[in-house]
Amino acid sequence: MAQIPLSLTINDERFERDSIDGGMWLNDFLREEVNLTGTKFCCGIAVCRVCTVAVARVPGAHLEPVRSCTTDLHEVNGKIITTVEGLAKRGQLHPLQQAFLENFSFQCGYSAPGFLMAAYCLLDRLERSPIPEVALDAAIQEAVGKHICRCTGYVRYHRAIRQVALETPGLVT
Ligand code: FES
Ligand code: FES
């Protein structure tokens, strides 16, 4: 792919390049160019979702979960990206991270960043459009149901996300 000028915001920090291969995978850029290795790589074919990051088109726009292993820089140029490193603020874990710990959701932890970022996008969606509690399990399933965890933390990931959605004011009616 052609060289392109790149301008990205990642975790509130601006990243500019005068010229970079627009076909480089976002996962490679994050892990190898800017050393954000919290975003994992596994299948490389958009199946396992360990590589998920949150992407907004413009500031304040809704967050979309994006699989960074099959998304190239050209597709995200100019956009706003949040990775797992951007969740904790001022030394405080994000409520999702805290809930994953409290619920023993992960074992090796390799799948955790992907689950976190997909759940983070779900919370953003619920904040904009709250849903009734009866619909919550289906919404969580839709958000993370295709994520693969080889340590089989599925039930505990689900429980943790449910807990945060219910404990955060205004997400569930
Ligand atoms: S590494 Fe498996 S979906 Fe991206
Ligand atoms: S915690 Fe090990 S793969 Fe999910």
Image (cartoon, rainbow, N blue to C red):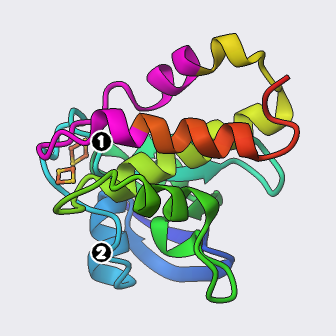
Q: Residue at x 71, y 37 (%)?
A: 166
Which quadrant of the structure image shows residue 93?
A: bottom right
| Place of residue 28 in the rendered image (x, y in percent of width and height, measured from the top left) | 27, 67
Q: Residue at x 33, y 56 (%)?
A: 104
Image-based side of 109 in relation to 169, left or right: left
**Quadrant location of the C terminus?**
top right
Sequence-first disc among 2 and 1:
2
Image-based side of 43 in relation to 89, left or right: left
- Under mark 2, the amino acid is Arg
Q: Is residue 65 above or below residue 141?
A: below
Mark 2 or mark 1, which is nearer to you?
1
| Place of residue 88 in the rendered image (x, y in percent of width and height, measured from the top left) | 59, 75
Cβ of mark 1 under 8 A from ligand 1: yes
* Stretch in magenta: 137-157
Residue 101 visible at all: yes
Q: Quadrant of ligand 1?
A: top left
Residue 7 visible at all: no
Camera-nearest residue between 29 and 102: 102
Is 121 contained in the magenta span? Answer: no
- Under mark 1, the amino acid is Arg
Residue 49, disc: 1
Cβ of mark 2 under 8 A from ligand 1: no
Q: Residue at x 58, y 61 (%)?
A: 81
Residue 31, disc: 2
SS category of the residue bearing label 1: loop
**Quadrant location of the N terminus?**
bottom left
